[in-house]
Amino acid sequence: MKIVVTGGAGYIGSHTCVELLENGWEVVVVDNLANSSFEALKRVEEITGKKIEFYQTDIRDKSKLSEIFSAYTSNSETSENHQKCSIDAVIHFAGLKAVGESVALPLEYYSNNITGTLTLLEVMKQYGVKNLVFSSSATVYGDPHTLPIKENFPLSVTNPYGRTKLMIEEILKDLHVSDPSWNIALLRYFNPVGADSSGRIGEDPFGIPNNLIPYIAQVAVGRLSFLNIFGDDYNTPDGTGVRDFIHVSDLAAGHIKALPKLFTNPGVVVYNLGTGKGHSVMELVRSFEKASDRKIPFKIAQRRAGDIAACYADPSKAERELDWKAVRTIDDMCRDTWNWQKNNPNGFRKD
């Protein structure tokens, strides 16, 4: 079966491509490479021994996106347009993803994330592809009043990035109401970290990282001189923010489990993908020091706009309905990140 992966050359996308290929799916990647690298896809092919079909395209470009879907469409069968598209589902990662950056650049986030999704949905509808796994986020829960977070909690947001995810969720729900033949899985991620155990692919942000673990890793490898910890006065055990860190390979496996669910025609389904455990920024620093056998110098900085004190999941619904559970520990996450970073000190770029 054939799956289109938007943003498939990115961090979570590339790891999901590994899981897809290793589980027998055919993969078509659409990525504009704005914050990703084609080298990641080459290494996915090395890891799996299987080929990826790749199109360097921005999903806001409707004509090019339509050309891609058209390439997998034959003249036969359907009553509407006498065409049959061989794409079975889309996993939608493409978009900008940093909370702090979204506060500074809201228009870029709305354009990339919302306009891009609308264009993708229009093309999917045109070609009769109505199975979608959407890369959502725990940010749609805002600042929760209680923990752990369940899927039926009230939704709100504290930053433009989260607002784009919540808006897209509402768009997708409205789409299903208008046409119940759509089947959509909304996967609300907590905090993806780690890297493939091969050490061949991992998180490789352009410029100074917005996310915690790649920043720590670049300090450990000497690319950055120290880590900024944004706030040590939260109401948490050590004053630093608490998050549900999930290994990216566990997260990727969740997408593989969501696909068969779509083919049972469930309508719109929502799942938290997290470990169910919270770890503080300082805990993560100490675990990374142990994994790398290096000291991580840090400075305490002011809290970032839009950040909250604590956030961790109740992932029991995904375990119950998808037979999925995160199995890797925080030490596994730090070990695999360090294995990636020490072997690729400049990421996918050459020395």
Image (cartoon, rainbow, N blue to C red):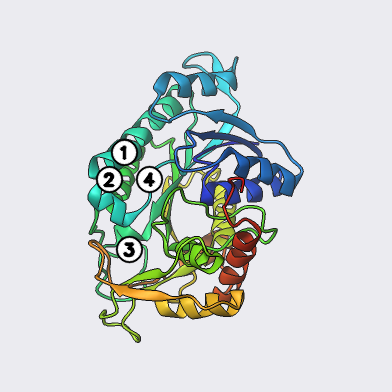
Residue 201 position in % (x across, y down):
62, 52
**Above or below, comparing residue 350 to residue 130 in the picture:** below
Q: Earlier in the sequence, mark 2 or mark 3?
A: 3
- Tell me whether the residue at label 2 lies in contact with that at label 3, contact meaning CB atoms closer than 8 angstroms: no
Residue that appears at 26% across and 64% down: 304
- The residue identified by callout 4 is 96
Q: CA distance from mark 1 to mark 3?
A: 23 Å
Q: CA distance from mark 2 to mark 3?
A: 17 Å
Please provide percent x and percent y for residue 121: 40, 31
> Of 174 and 169, which appears nearest the observer?
169
Nearest to the eye among marks 1 and 4: give it.
4
Mark 4, secondary structure of its residue: loop
Amino acid at circle 4:
Leu
Q: Is residue 290 left or right of residue 189?
A: right
Name the amino acid type tagged 2.
Met
Residue receiving disc 2? 167
Residue picked out by circle 3: 152
Decide: is 123 above or below 346.
above
Q: Which is more toward the observer, 283 or 91?
A: 283
Mark in the foreground, 2 or 3: 2
Q: Position of residue 231 (x, y in %)?
A: 28, 74
Alpha carbon separation for disc pair 4 and 3: 26 Å
